[in-house]
Image (spheres, coloured by chain):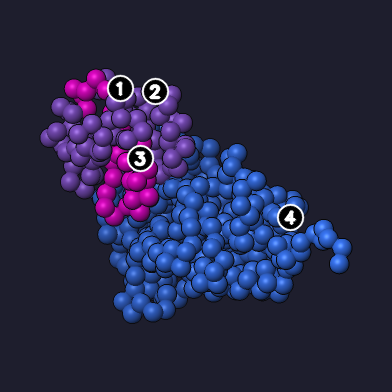
Chain colours: A blue, B purple
């Protein structure tokens, strides 16, 4: 059997990497299973890898680029001995001690686990949406904005991510339309004000995208007004979707307690229903969802894991008695 | 250089790709694309692993609008595999090493 780790951290966004910094400094030699490259937020470094300027992370007076911030987190944890595996966990068994994780056939036993798998962006779920990714439908505004110079673009959503994407895209497009299902936004005040003040941004209220036109590439949208039920064609050859997130918890179904939306349930800090398994970041938080709250909860999970490990009987101390005294 | 990655441009593309009797994988990328940076080291490893069977090249979409436009690249990273100068397969978006390997192996 391979060596049993003290702690394995699954996920490498602000929560996972903060847990790595703290457990590494506590000499627990954490292994971070950081995920695999992808063009969605489900990737090493997490959601900040697809953002541009982060203006609200304390300590950076002039803001910092999301990927740059995550690179710094990663190096900081490595400095104290955190190790990384660029892979995805494929299976877990939390019913045995030590716990077991697998990457394909490779088995990784560990005394404790910190779950920081985060959340990923929802897609619209329209029939031809996936075929049009890369041909007008994009999951990454920072990657693809450049290709939409002069195109009419639609951004779907009413939160901060939607505003950020729309504002970013005005650098390239002549017109960006924000399509939102309600008649008011849930984005923060500052982002709303910036969006309202931008002459290239217009709003299409009370509407949802119900169809994507085009085979080889996106040629237009079909919108449905939720108040009137009226359907209309909408001119857009670029579509960016920012309608919310779904937690990455499929791996833990049947083993960790979740709420009705699939978010992990934590109690007394970062504890899950399994003793020795801790959760932090967006995988257990659908309310705040900020880099700083994720990092804070990652610190909590690390301290909880460290204390929990200390409270456990150390097996190397319990040697079987073979001699009579 | 047998191994490593060749940088292509609008002017060298045809000669390097169309004229090649090896399989050629072209990575359409740009400096400002995070997912592109994530897969860059993987492509280097694949270039070494498949040396002699596959040539890995990259093309900066910022500097080379001609070729980028010819292949209607609208999302990066896009990887296009060329066989005898024609498109054999096209992969949009960053992927892990094993997944890339699987998709490529069907053509090797």
The stretch in magenta equals: B17-46
Judging from the image, what secondary structure is the residue with disc 4 in? loop
Tell me, yes or no, if residue A277 can be seen here.
Answer: yes
Tell me the tag on residue B45.
3
Image quarter hosting the C terminus of chain B: top left
For residue B107, the mark is: 2
Q: Secondary structure at mark 3?
A: helix
The mark nearer the N terminus, 3 or 1, is: 3
Count neighbours of disc 1 (C-alpha within 10 A) and say few if under 14, some if 14 to 19, many if 20 or more: many
The residue sitting at 46% across, 68% down in the picture is A80
Query: Which label was assigned to residue A324?
Result: none
Element marked by disc 2: loop
> Pointer 4: residues within 10 angstroms few (<14), some, or many (20+)?
few
Residue under numbered circle 4: A97
Q: Nearer the viewer, mark 2 or mark 4?
A: 4
Name the secondary structure under disc 1.
Answer: strand
**Would you say residue B43 sits in the magenta stretch?**
yes
Residue position marked by numbered label 1 in the rendering: B83
Could you tell me which chain the residue with mark 1 belongs to?
B
Q: Are both tags, 2 and 4, on one chain?
A: no
């Amino acid at each position: 059997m391979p060596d049993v780790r003290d702690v394995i951290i699954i996920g490498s966004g602000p929560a996972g990497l903060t847990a790595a910094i703290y457990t590494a400094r506590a000499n627990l030699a954490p292994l971070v299973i950081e995920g695999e490259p992808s063009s969605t937020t489900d990737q090493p470094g997490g959601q900040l890898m697809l953002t541009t300027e982060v203006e609200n992370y304390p300590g950076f007076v002039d803001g910092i680029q999301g990927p740059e911030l995550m690179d710094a987190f990663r190096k900081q944890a490595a400095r104290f001995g955190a190790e990384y595996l660029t892979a995805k966990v494929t299976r877990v068994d939390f019913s045995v001690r030590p716990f077991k994780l697998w990457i394909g056939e490779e088995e990784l036993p560990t005394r404790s686990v910190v779950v920081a798998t985060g959340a990923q962006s929802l897609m619209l779920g329209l029939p031809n949406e996936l075929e049009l990714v890369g041909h007008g439908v994009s999951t990454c505004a920072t990657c693809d904005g450049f290709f939409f110079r002069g195109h009419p673009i639609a951004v779907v959503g009413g939160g901060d991510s939607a505003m950020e994407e729309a504002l970013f895209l005005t650098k390239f497009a002549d017109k960006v339309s924000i399509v939102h299902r309600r008649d008011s936004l849930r984005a923060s005040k500052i982002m709303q004000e910036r969006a309202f003040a931008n002459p290239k941004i217009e709003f299409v209220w009370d509407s949802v995208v119900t169809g994507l036109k085009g085979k080889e590439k996106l040629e237009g949208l079909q919108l449905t007004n939720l108040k009137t039920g009226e359907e209309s064609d909408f001119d857009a050859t670029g579509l960016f979707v920012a309608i919310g997130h779904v937690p990455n918890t499929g791996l833990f179904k049947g083993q960790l307690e979740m709420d009705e939306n699939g978010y992990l349930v934590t109690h007394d800090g970062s504890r899950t229903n399994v003793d020795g398994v801790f959760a932090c970041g967006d995988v257990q938080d659908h309310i705040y969802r900020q880099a700083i709250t994720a990092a804070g909860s990652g610190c909590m999970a690390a301290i909880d894991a460290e204390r929990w490990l200390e409270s456990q009987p150390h097996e190397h101390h319990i040697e079987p008695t073979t001699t009579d005294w | 250089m047998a191994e490593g990655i060749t940088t292509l441009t609008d002017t060298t593309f045809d000669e390097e790709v169309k004229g090649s009797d090896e399989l050629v994988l072209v990575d359409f990328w740009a400096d400002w694309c995070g997912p592109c940076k994530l897969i860059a080291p993987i492509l280097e490893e694949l270039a070494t692993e498949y040396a002699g069977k596959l040539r890995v090249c990259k093309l900066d979409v910022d500097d080379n609008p001609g070729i980028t436009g010819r292949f209607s690249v609208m999302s990066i990273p896009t990887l296009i595999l060329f066989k005898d100068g024609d498109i054999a397969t096209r992969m949009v978006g960053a992927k892990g090493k094993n997944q890339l390997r699987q998709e490529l192996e069907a053509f090797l």
